[in-house]
């Protein structure tokens, strides 16, 4: 992608961050909380895992006294990367770990040594945005020796409207493949079923039911529900007994509705 493409999008993302900071929060539910210092966000293509990773980083920066960092480990999808939100996240005090200079725009599998150092130091809340499916998660295998047992959460972002995670068996297959390729074990599930701008409350709740069933079969807890902030205030969510992370769509491209 040409540098001008990303720079244009940075301005729009910063404006969106500013708008969200003054918008009314959804106060009905608890928010996600973690004891572990490293939060690994993994999901298949189209799961929304980068959007979750960015929104989670922003939320942590706004609500905790800890230093927060986000590392872009997505070497699969060059179009939706957490590094697009660098300027806006850095304005909130988040340290963004990703290639700089000409390599910032490169569609190359670049793994920075700073990421390994951040994993081993554990002196900040570190969000790892990992590429989709088992192929993308393979990058974690080169870092697996740096993770101490009990020092991390590795969570599958589950979108029930994607072909390979549309049913329980498909989800279990993906979990096994990612664990094998990454040499790490999942600790939980993030329910994030959506249809982009066509998402409804029913879409989200149907996905939550799927996530709970996958959790029962896999032994993994559903850690939290993620969904558009504009939807989560609806009465349909009043009985949801999980922490909730309201999302703003920040990773829009110029040709999408709402992009400037």
Image (cartoon, helix red, strand yellow):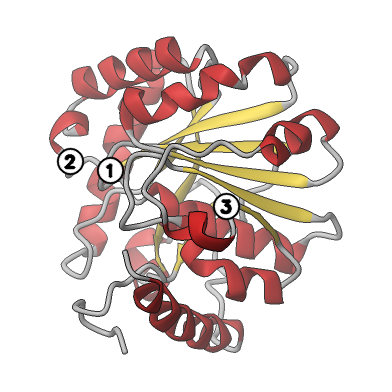
Quarter of the rendering containing residue 3: bottom left
Estimate how packed mark 1 is, as few (under 14), some (14 to 19) or many (20 or more) residues with alpha carbons within 10 Å: many
Residue corresponding to mark 2:
162
Vertical placement of residue 13 versus 105, above or below: below
Please tell me which residue is depicted at 17% across the width and 41% down the height of the picture. Answer: 162
Q: Is 182 placed left or right of 76 in the picture?
A: right
Image x and y of residue 186, in percent: 51, 21
Image x and y of residue 254, in percent: 26, 79
Please tell me which residue is depicted at 17% across the width and 44% down the height of the picture. Answer: 161
Question: Residue 86's mark?
Answer: none
Closer to us: 81 or 108: 108
Please tell me which residue is depicted at 35% across the width and 57% down the height of the picture. Answer: 80
Alpha carbon distance from label 1 to label 2 = 6 Å
Residue corresponding to mark 1:
159
Counting residues from the start of the chain, the first of labels 3 and 1 encountered is 3
Q: Can residue 226 be seen in this view?
A: no
Alpha carbon distance from label 3 to label 1 = 29 Å
Alpha carbon distance from label 3 to label 2 = 30 Å
Vertical placement of residue 98 versus 167, above or below: below
Quadrant including the N terminus: bottom left
User: Helix, strand, or loop for circle 2?
Assistant: loop
Q: Are marks 1 and 2 in contact (CB under 8 Å)?
A: yes
Residue corresponding to mark 3:
99
Q: Is residue 250 visible?
A: yes
Quadrant including the C terminus: bottom left
Eye-nearest disc, 3 or 2: 3
Vertical placement of residue 239 versus 147, above or below: below
């Amino acid at each position: 992608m040409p540098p001008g493409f990303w720079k244009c999008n940075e301005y729009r993302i910063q404006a969106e961050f500013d708008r969200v900071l003054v918008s009314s929060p959804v106060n009905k539910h608890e928010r996600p909380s973690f004891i572990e210092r490293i939060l690994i966000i993994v999901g298949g293509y189209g799961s929304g895992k980068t959007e979750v990773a960015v929104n989670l980083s922003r939320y942590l920066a706004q609500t905790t006294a800890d230093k927060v960092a986000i590392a872009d480990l997505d070497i699969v999808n060059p179009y939706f990367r957490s590094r697009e939100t660098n300027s806006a996240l850095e304005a909130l005090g988040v340290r963004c770990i990703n290639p700089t200079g000409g390599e910032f725009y490169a569609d190359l599998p670049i793994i920075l040594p700073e990421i390994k150092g951040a994993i081993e130091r554990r002196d900040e809340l570190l969000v790892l945005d990992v590429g989709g499916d088992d192929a993308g998660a393979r990058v974690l295998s080169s870092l697996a020796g740096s993770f101490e047992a009990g020092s991390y959460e590795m969570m599958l972002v589950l979108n029930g409207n994607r072909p390979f995670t549309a049913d329980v068996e498909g989800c279990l297959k993906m979990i096994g493949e990612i664990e094998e390729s990454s040499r790490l074990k999942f600790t939980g599930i993030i329910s994030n079923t959506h249809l982009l701008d066509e998402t409804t409350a029913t879409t989200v709740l149907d996905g939550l039911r799927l996530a709970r069933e996958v959790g029962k079969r896999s032994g993994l807890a559903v850690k939290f529900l993620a969904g558009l902030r504009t939807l989560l205030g609806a009465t349909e969510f009043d009985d949801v007994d999980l922490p909730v992370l309201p999302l703003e769509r920040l990773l829009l491209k110029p040709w999408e509705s709402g992009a400037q």
